[in-house]
Image: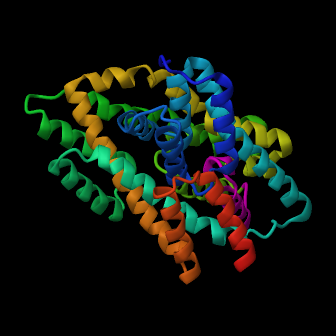
C-alpha cells in the first residue's frame, strides 16, 4: 500500500463506475484505466502504470481485470485487491447473467447493433489516446522505438502475445545490459503456468454437464489463457462446441456477442455460458472459476513488481515488455478500427472523441455514453 492511498470508498466507487462503463474489450479497459488513474486521479505515474500493465500481461488470465486487481493491491493491500477486482467484474457479470436469463426464456437477444455503432468509434479514440500517452513514457530510446516497431510487425504476423512479450523483454535485457543476464527464470514463469491447466484437459472429454465440471473447465481457461479476450473464442469453440458439444455454434456466437456488448471484462462471457448450461448456479461457478486464477496470480506476484524494477537487469526486461505490450495494443486498435469506423459518421465520431480526450480531458465514461446515444439516434 502506498503512502498516498486513496480512501477505500473512493477506490470502490471508481472501480464500480469502470465496471459499469468500461466498454470495448481489454485494450479499451487498459486505456480507460490509464485515463482514470494516471491522468485524472494521478494515483499512478506513467512508469508505475506500465510496470503493472507489463506484469498483468505476463501472467495468464484476463489482463485488464488483473491490471485492476494490481492497482487495487498497490493502493490498499489485500482489501484493495479483492474490492478492486470484484467491483470491476461484478457489474458485467450481473448484466451478462440477466441477458442469459432473457436468452433462455425468449431465445433471442435485445437489439444491440445501434448502440455498438456509436460506442465502437469512441473506444478506438480512447485506445489511441492511451497508446500515444503511454508510448511517450515507455519509448525511452531509439533502441526501444525499434523494438516496438518490430513488435508491431510480429503481432501483425500472428506471433502469440506471451512469446512476443517474453521475447521483447529478453532482447531488451540482453542488448541493454551487456553482462550475462539471468532473466531466463523470468521468461519461464508464464510457461510453467501452462502445465497445471493442461493437466485438466482430459477430465472433460465426453462427460455430462455438472456444476463441478463447469467450474473446473473455466478454472482451466482462466489458468492457461494468455492474451486478450478475443483469444477466449478459440478456446471456447474448440472445447465447448467441437469436443464436449455442450453448446451449439449459434449459442457460442450469441455468448460472445453479449460479452462484447456489455461493459467490463470480456471473460464474463463465461457467466452467460454458465447460465445456459446450469442456470444461476452455473453462472456463478463459471464466473468464479474463470476469474479465481487472476486473483491468486496477482496476490502471488504483486509484491515482486517494485523489487523487480529496482534491479537493473529486470528493469531492462520490463522496458521491453512494456514496449511490446503497447505495440500489441496499437495493432489491436488498428484491427478494431477497421470494423468500428465504417463510414463518415463513425470517422467523425472517433475524431471528435479523440479531440475531447486530448484537448478537453473529458471523462471517457461520458464519451462512451454519448457514443451510445449517438448510435441510437443516427443508425
Picture coordinates of residue 74 (x, y %)? 49, 24
Q: Using residue 259 as the reference point, say whether residue 71 is left or right of it.
A: left
Residue at (42%, 37%) from the top-left corner? 49
**Number of marks:** 0
Q: Which of the pair 26/289 is nearer the observer?
A: 26
Picture coordinates of residue 172 (x, y %)? 20, 41
What are the residue bounds of the magenta stretch? 246-269
Q: Is residue 194 magenta?
A: no
Q: Is residue 261 magenta?
A: yes
Q: Using residue 181 as the reference point, say whether residue 188 is left or right of it.
A: right
Picture coordinates of residue 171 (x, y %)? 19, 43
Residue at the limit of the structure toward the right, as seen here? 105
Residue at (26%, 42%) from the top-left corner? 320
Residue at (63%, 39%) from the top-left corner? 290
Residue at the limit of the structure toward the front, as seen here? 360
Compared with 102, 283 (above or below) is above
Picture coordinates of residue 86 (x, y %)? 67, 33
Label the magenta part by its dominant secondary structure.
helix
Residue 175: image quadrant is top left
Q: Using residue 12 as the reference point, say whether residue 4 is left or right of it.
A: left
Amino acid at each position: 500500500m502506498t503512502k498516498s492511498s486513496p480512501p477505500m470508498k473512493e477506490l470502490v466507487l471508481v472501480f464500480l463506475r469502470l465496471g459499469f462503463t468500461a466498454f470495448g474489450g481489454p485494450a479499451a479497459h487498459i486505456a480507460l484505466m490509464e485515463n482514470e488513474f494516471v491522468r485524472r486521479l494521478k494515483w499512478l505515474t506513467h512508469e508505475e502504470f506500465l510496470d503493472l500493465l507489463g506484469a498483468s500481461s505476463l501472467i495468464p488470465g484476463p489482463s485488464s481485470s488483473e491490471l485492476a486487481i494490481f492497482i487495487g493491491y498497490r493502493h490498499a493491500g489485500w482489501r484493495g485487491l479483492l474490492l478492486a477486482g470484484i467491483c470491476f467484474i461484478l457489474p458485467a457479470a450481473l448484466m451478462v447473467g440477466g441477458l442469459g436469463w432473457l436468452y433462455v426464456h425468449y431465445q433471442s437477444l435485445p437489439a444491440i447493433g445501434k448502440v455498438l455503432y456509436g460506442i465502437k468509434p469512441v473506444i478506438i479514440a480512447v485506445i489511441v489516446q492511451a497508446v500515444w500517452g503511454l508510448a511517450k513514457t515507455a519509448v525511452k530510446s531509439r533502441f526501444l522505438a525499434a523494438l516496438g516497431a518490430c513488435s508491431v510487425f510480429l503481432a501483425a504476423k500472428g506471433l502469440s502475445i506471451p512469446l512476443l512479450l517474453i521475447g521483447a523483454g529478453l532482447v531488451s535485457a540482453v542488448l541493454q545490459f551487456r553482462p550475462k543476464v539471468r532473466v531466463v527464470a523470468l521468461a519461464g514463469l508464464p510457461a510453467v503456468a501452462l502445465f497445471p491447466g493442461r493437466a485438466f484437459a482430459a477430465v472433460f472429454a465426453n462427460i455430462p454437464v455438472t456444476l463441478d465440471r463447469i467450474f473446473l473447465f473455466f478454472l482451466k481457461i482462466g489458468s492457461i489463457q494468455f492474451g486478450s479476450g478475443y483469444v477466449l473464442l478459440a478456446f471456447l469453440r474448440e472445447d465447448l462446441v467441437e469436443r464436449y458439444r455442450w453448446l451449439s455454434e449459434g449459442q457460442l456466437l450469441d455468448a460472445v456477442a453479449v460479452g462484447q456488448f456489455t461493459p467490463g471484462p470480456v471473460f464474463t462471457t463465461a457467466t452467460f455460458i454458465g447460465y445456459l448450461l446450469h442456470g444461476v448456479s452455473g453462472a456463478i461457478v463459471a464466473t468464479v472459476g474463470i476469474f479465481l486464477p487472476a486473483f491468486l496470480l496477482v496476490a502471488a506476484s504483486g509484491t515482486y513488481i517494485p523489487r523487480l524494477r529496482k534491479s537493473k537487469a529486470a528493469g531492462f526486461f520490463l522496458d521491453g515488455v512494456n514496449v511490446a505490450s503497447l505495440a500489441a495494443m496499437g495493432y489491436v486498435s488498428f484491427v478494431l478500427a477497421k470494423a468500428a469506423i465504417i463510414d463518415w459518421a463513425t470517422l467523425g465520431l472517433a475524431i471528435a472523441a479523440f479531440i475531447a480526450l486530448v484537448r478537453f480531458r473529458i471523462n471517457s465514461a461520458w464519451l462512451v455514453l454519448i457514443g451510445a446515444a449517438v448510435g441510437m439516434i443516427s443508425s
